[in-house]
Structure formats: structure tokens, C-alpha cells
Image: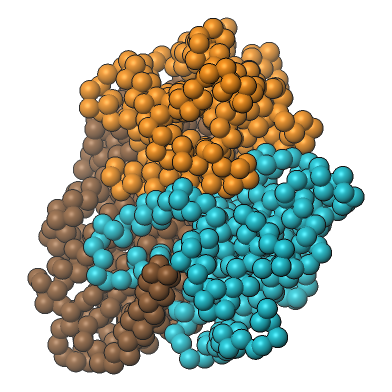
Chain colours: A orange, B cyan, C brown
Amino acid sequence: MLTPTILIQLVLAGVLQGGTYALAAFGLSLVFCIADVLNITHGEFLMLGGLVTYLLFALTGLNPFLILIIVIPVFVLIGAGYQKVFIKPILNRPPRQLLFSSIVVTVGIATAIEDTTSFIWGPTVKGVSYSMPAFNVGGVVVSSLRLSILVLIIALTIFLHFYLKKSFAGKAIRAILQNREGAMVVGINVPRIVTLVFGIAIGLAGTAGLFYVLLFTIGPFIGLPLTIRYIAIVMLGGSGSLIGSLVGGLILGVAETFAGFFLGAHWSLAVAFCTLVLVLLLKPQGLFKHV
Amino acid sequence: MSKKIFNPWEGILIIFLVFLAVMPRFIDPYWVVFLLLLFMYIGIGASFNITAGYLGYVNLGHYVFFGISAYGFSILYVKGVPFILCLATGVLVTLIFATLISYPFLRLKGAYFALANFGLIKLFELVAGSLRDFTGGTQGISLKPGYRAFETYYIFLGVTLLTVLVCYWIPRSKFGLALFSVREDEEVAAAFGIDVTKYKMSAYVLSALFPALLGGVYAWYSAFIDPEVVFGTDKALLPVTMVMMGGTGTFLGPIIGAIFMMLIEELLWTSGWLPIWIKSLHLTMLGLILAAVGIFSPGGLVTLSPFEKFFTWVGLGRFLGASHKSLKLDGT
Amino acid sequence: MKKVWFVFFLAMAVFFGTIQASTAQEKKEIVVGMTLCLTGKFAADVGPFDRMIKAWENYVNKKQGGLYVKAYNKKLPVRTIVYDDKSDQATAVKFYERLVTVDKCDILIGPKSTPITFPVTSVPEKYHVPMVLATANTPAVFNRGFKWFVGVQQLSTHWEDYYFDLLDEEKQVKTIGYVAEDTPHTREVYEGAIPNAEKRGYKTAFKEIAPAATTDFTSILLKLKAADPDIIYVSSFTPFGVTFKKQAKEFGLKPREWHFTHFDISFSSALGKDANYVTGAHHWLPGLPYGNLKKFQEILKETNIDTEQYLDVGIHYVALEIAEVAIEKADSLKPEDLLKSAWAVNFESILGPMYIDQTLGHGSFKQFAAQYIDGKYYLIFPKKFATHKHVYPNPAP
């Protein structure tokens, strides 16, 4: 039953699927690593990214890939604002209290966002009717929409990679990840960098939301289940690691498609989660160390 | 200090408990249902507190014990097995599961532990949904229907009292002392010769007992469960949020948190004089209150100084219990 | 200090306030109570129904002067109470208890979704207060021998009756491929549809169930493509349906017709041109000639509810109609009389003739077949009020 065509098809689907996951996961991963904050609100920002895209598309009919240019900076700013108002007050607490507080605050904000969104724009799901023709390569169907999204994700990832490696802010982020006190001694303005990291993270979430609404539908209540999935990837891949999020996302994506094919669709998600639990048990810190 | 003298306020507490026991005869059955749910949340919350507050391991997946027991109970009950056996099996299966999973999971730290457990809930939801022949799949299990609010009220009251008593006893026992030392600094505790693994596992399994009891009985009460009802992620976060709002690591925290949240929901929905838009946004307000508590009162509502002052004033200071801020040497 | 006392007094106020409400003796009004999924998972299907309930109440009280009660030989005003059950089982049960014991409702309207309906139906059974189930159509709910509720819809296994009747008449379809979302309702419809179709002679080319949260349908689409049925039948809610259709397009699936058991404006706006000529089931759409249309349309206009978006409007409204008819035809407001009257209803609702199956208690409404054509939803079967002819095969490129 498993012809090479089907095999390639499954791998391709898994990779495309995984790539979308990875993008959203990386922001979560960075935030967790740099501030020890479990940002359960992450999924809500993805939802909002999708919502903004939907609204702009419905209003202007602009090509979503152009809407991207608006979405990214807007969400970076939202992220920074969010951090300053809600997260900053709890950052300087001892680790266990920080864990509790971050859960309480982020769950609270997430609930508030979901409810308000449902109230203002209604609880119905929304989608964007933008499509690109798929093409056929020797029997293997390639979705050009998904491929474009994957290309963009890879581009973003490469950009982030170099940003973290070469730019001053990027190096500052890595310094803080490795040794917080040391970074402070060297004169890095830690609070400002943390705000920047949140901005980047939420910016990534919003972008992921744009891609998400192109492929699927969004509704006010999709945030929480998605956050759980991304947390799973973060833990799988190792927090703070760009490669880790990518690999984690890919593993989950491919596991889903293959399980769906061999075991039947209703096992695909269960297998994915099992994979996560297994990896965690073998490597409690995740597969990769932080950047 | 004044432990030998009979504190009149404690007498009131006993009268209050007796009142709870006879109340169902005199009040609207609605309040019986309301209280039954309140007891359930307190029970789940207080047992969550054992690992989160006392041991310092935040088990976000605590609710999974509730669900496993509910399913264990239901699967047997539809086959005609008597109630007690079903409950016992449900609880036993949950405890065995807790024991097996505790060793590998307790090797994880902090947020990883929290999230791995949370992932378990999702995993069980998916598995329960897939194993149609065993668990009825997404259609769920439908038990023999019946109106069981009164019996459930008493059972929940009993189980919750038990949970609360255990949570009261732990900080005052050697067991509790060991848990606190693990919480404060695990390596140092081990260096002092405390069998850290044994205490962690015991706390974990002990905390599983109470939601297991509640879960099995809940299945019987509602006569219908499916993966979403007992393993749903928003439901799973609810008792956790209640405890965190009330104050983790304290005896009163889970109780206060549960009462507070249920009352707010009740008030927002049933007071006729509130405008409709407030009612529509009740979750938003709850979320904002939650965030406010997290930002301004990290120890939970219980640590709000007016609250502490009130309880000390009425002489119930010793119920404030050990908070995660400090452990006073005189056991208060 | 202040905070604690505040909460304490509030608690006492709630407690005493509700106790006082329950000691009211004389019947001055008819109370109709229910919970709605205003937040949570099912909010998307329920939406603004609380407005509709209130509008109905206003209409009945202002334009009809209330509802006629035989025992008093006069009309009494109606008061409706709505609680938000947050799509949660325990919350719903709690509120239905409240509706019965504290708010002293005369008639209840049932909640949405199977997991909530199951435990909730024990409440009317225990307290002997009649309930009208608006959305429940799971056979299992009606098979338990409960007496104190009636339903609006036929059982879910009949969801596709009219659609298959249409196919029978046109004699153009030979094979059908089935995909279902693994949620109780959609699964039941799928499980009822397959034997229904096979009995009529349609071959099942493919069938599979996928979890509701599936985001990649590669394996199913590959198999469906190979099977190439005339109709691809998808039993799903909007999120699943949209994702599936989008991916199906990429895979180049071109059946002669697409059928989605639930479709609404969210569905068609998310798919744009790709939703054209999709068929499905609908409840109330303009074009139906039944019942007190003037009243219904006035309420719709006042509350600004779009029937193309909210499938359940029709059945929710009919539940109210059943309650109305039951009250006015009953000998008195006593529970037994109301219940007898509810079981005996036989009138023309806005969805057509409505009567209750005397064995199981479910209603008589079967979903109409509809089709989305060039931006609007049309009824295509039964023919007598179809607003558009069925377009088959799918002419879209």
C-alpha cells in the first residue's frame, strides 16, 4: 500500500504541517527560556493574528501575504505592550512563585481575550477564502499555498537565526539565556531585552495566526488547545532552541500524518502526544539545548 | 498559646459542619447541587495543593485522576457491577496509574513537570476518544439514569472533609515537614538523608486519591461521561485556577478560591439588576480578576492582609496554615 | 476586611434573595426557563439566541397579551429566564436545578449537545416539570423511557431523509464516499446516513471517521481520490468541513457533488467560490410557507439574526412554539396537564407539521435539503417550497 508516491506525499504533508507548528512554538520557547514564564496566552495571540488577518481581508481583499507586512510589526508592538503591563510586575519573583504567577496571570488574560473576542466578533468561526492552485509533481500533490507558507517560515527562521547570531540585540538575548547575571554585569539592559523578546514572540504568534487562518479556520476558543500543542513542541525540542522547535514541530507533524495513514485518522493526534511524552521521559530537558 | 482553652469560634465551626450535614432537608435542592459542585472543586483543589503547594511540584494534569476514575467506574457500572466495587476499582486503577507514572514524571522539574502532566490529560482525552470498544469513544458512556443529588451531596461532603482534614494534618506532621524541605531545596533535603523519591511519590499518589474518589462518584451522579467532560482542558484548569487564586500552599487557599469563583459566577448570572452586557462578559471579568490576583497578590486571596487580619481576629489563625512564603517554627 | 465582609454580605444577599423568590405562591405569570451555550464550545451555534428568547417574550406579552390559560380563563404574561451553561455539563445541571426549584419554571427548554442533555433530562423527570428539547435528536436520549420531555426534531438517523429522497427522484447518483468528524452528533448522522443510503441502493465507495481536531487529511484524501465517488458526503461542523474542503481542492478531488451536513455563512465565506454548489441540510430558510411567519419574521428582524448563519434558529423557535401551544391547549398550568398537552401537540409550526412520536417523545421535524448557489442558500427539497432547482452535477471548474 505504501508506494513511494504516497510516502513522499506523507512526508511532505508532515513537513508542511510541522513547519507551521514550529513557528508558533519558537516564540513560546524563547519566552519561557528567557523569562521563565509559561505564556499560556500565546495561543490567544495566534488567534488574534488570524482574526486581524480575517478582518483586513474581509475589509480590503488584500493578498494575505501583503497583510503579513502589517501583522508582524503590529503584533511585535502588542507583545511588547503585553509584557510591560502584565508580565513585568511578576518577573522578579522567586522561581516557584513565578511559575504560579505566570500560570495565573496568563490563564486570566487568555480567558479575558477569548471572552471579549467572542463578545465583539461573535463565537462563530472565520476563515479566509484565499487559495492558490496546487501543482502535481509526478503524482505527488503539492499545495502551493502550504509551500509558500513553508518558504516564508523557513525565511523567517533563517532571519531569526542570523538575528540572534549577529545583531547586538540577538547576542544580548543569547547572553541572557546563558547567564543572566553575567549579562547584567556586562551592562545589558535586561528588562528591555526581555520586552523585545516578548515582542518577537508575540509577533511570531501573530504571523503563525495569519498562516493558520489561511489553512484552517479560527474561532475565539481555539487558543487554549493550540497553546497546549505548542507547549508540547517546545518541551520536545528543548526550550530556547530554534532548531529544537523546528525539529519538534516536524516530528509532531510527521508523526501525525504517518499515524493517520497507517493507524487510521483517529490515532494521529494520540500518537503525536505519546511521542512527546516518550521523548520527555528519555530526555527531560528536550532534544536540544537553547541557542 | 491558647490551645487548651476552648475557642468559641471553633464551636461555631463544628455547628457549621453539622448545619452542612442537615441542610439538604431544609433548603432548595438547587443549593444542594450548588454545594455539591463546590465540595467537588474544593476536594480537587485541596488535593492539587498537596503536590503543588506542599511539595512544590505544580501538577497541571491533576484532573486526570478524576477522569481515569470516572471512566474506570463507568465501564464497570454499565456491566452491572455494584456501586462500591466500581468505585473501588476506579480508585485503585487511578492509584496504580499514579504510582507508575510518578517515578518518571517526578524526575522532571518545575514547568516541565507541570506541562508533561498537562499533556497527559490531552493524551487521555484522545485515547478515550479512540478506544471505542472499551470506552465508548467520543460518544461517551451513558450510565443508568437517576436523580442522585442528595446521596452525592453527602458523599462529596464526606470526601471533601477528608481531603481538607488531610491537608490540615500534613503541615503539622513529619510527612509534611519532609515535603516542605523537598520543596525548599531538593538537593539539600537529599543530602540530609531524606528519601526524596519516596516522599515525592507518596505525595503524588496521595493527591491522586481524592480526585479519584470524586471522579467515580461524579460519573454516577451525572450518569453520562465522555472524553471532553472528564478530560477537557478548560475543565482541567478550573480547579487549578481556583487554588491559585485562593492561595497555594495554604490550607484555606483552595476553599477560599473555590467559594470565591463559584460565588462570582452565581452573582453575575442570577442577579437581575446587572445589565446584560456584564453577564455576557462574565468570563472576561473572571479572567481579569484572575490576572489581577496573579499580579498584585501572588500568594492568592488568602494572603491579602485584610483576610489574614480577619482570621486572626476571630481566633482561627491556626487555619491560615503554612504558606509558601515562610514556615514559622511554631507550626502556625 | 472590607473585601471579606463584602463577599460575605453578598453571599447572604444571594441566599436570602433567592429564598424569598421561591416563597411566592400565586400564579401571576408563566415562567419558561432554559440554559443556552452562550460561551464555550457550542457558542458558535447558539450565538444570539438569548435575544430571540427575549424578543419572543416581548412579542407574546405585547402583541398577544400573554398566553391563554384554560384554568383561569384568561391570558397570563410570560417571563423567560436564560442562564449561560458555558457549554459545560455540571454548570447546566446546576442551573436547571435552579430553574426548577428556585425560579419555579412551568416549562423548560432543553440545552444543546448530548453530554449536557443526558444528565439534564433527569431534572424534569425528577421534579415533574415538562421540558421541550430543541436541539437533541440522539436516539439514546429518547430511548431511556423518560416521560417528562418531548423533542422538536426527528431522530438524527433521519437527518438525511429528504436529501436521499431528492437523490432517489433524480436517479443520477450511484456511489457515495463518506467522511465524518468524530463528534457525537456528526458521527450519529453519518452512522444513520450510511444504512439509509445503502438501503436505497447507493454504494458506499469509501467511509472513514477522523478526529475533530484533524488538520491534515492527506491519508483520507488519497483514498477518496482513488475511490472517486459521485458524491462526497462530509458529516462535520464548520471548522472540520472548511479545512477538509480546502485540502480536497488542492488534491484535485472533483466529485459530482459535495454534501456537508452542517453549513452556514462561516462555511461559505471561509471557502469563497469553493463553496459554490455545495449541498447540505438546513432548518429554516426564507421560502418556507409554514406557520405564523409574520411573528417569526418580525422577531428575526428585531433581533437581527441571520438564518443562513445560525442553523438552529428554526428548531429553537419551534421549541418555543411547542411550549406556547402546549400551554394554551392545556387544562391548567399543573405539570401533569402541561405534559399531557405537550405530548399531544399537533400544529403547523414554522418548520412544518409538528407532532410528537407517542412512543419515544421526539418531534417530527426532518432537516430540509439545501444548496449554496452563487452567494445564497436555497432550499432544494422537498420540491413544494424549494426556492431553487437542485444543481447537479457540480458545474464549477
Q: Residue furthest right?
A: B193
- On the rendered structure, is C106 left or right of A95? left
Residue C98 shows in the view: yes
- On the rendered structure, is C209 left or right of C136? right
In the rendered image, the vertical position of residue B29 relative to residue A286, given as above or below: below
Q: Residue furthest left?
A: C63
Residue C120 shows in the view: no
Where the C terminus of chain A falls, by quadrant? Answer: top right
Question: Residue B165 placed where, x, y %?
Answer: 69, 73
Question: Residue C278 placed where, x, y %?
Answer: 35, 34
Q: Nearer the viewer, residue A21 or A241?
A: A241
Q: Nearer the viewer, residue C83 or C213?
A: C83
In the rendered image, the vertical position of residue A241 relative to residue B77, given as above or below: above
- On the rendered structure, is B235 left or right of B321? left
What residue is rendered at 74% in x and 68% in y? Answer: B172
Q: How many marks?
A: 0
Q: Nearer the viewer, residue A185 or B76?
A: A185
- Tell me the quarter of the picture where residue C136 sits: bottom left
Question: Residue C211 placed where, x, y %?
Answer: 57, 41
In the rendered image, the vertical position of residue C20 relative to residue C178, given as above or below: below
In the rendered image, the vertical position of residue C97 relative to residue B104, given as above or below: below
Where the N terminus of chain A falls, by quadrant? Answer: top right
What residue is rendered at 22% in x and 51% in y? Answer: C305
- Tell me the quarter of the picture where residue A50 sits: top left
What residue is rendered at 81% in x and 44% in y? Answer: B188
Question: Residue C391 placed where, x, y %?
Answer: 30, 32
What residue is rendered at 52% in x and 38% in y? Answer: A91
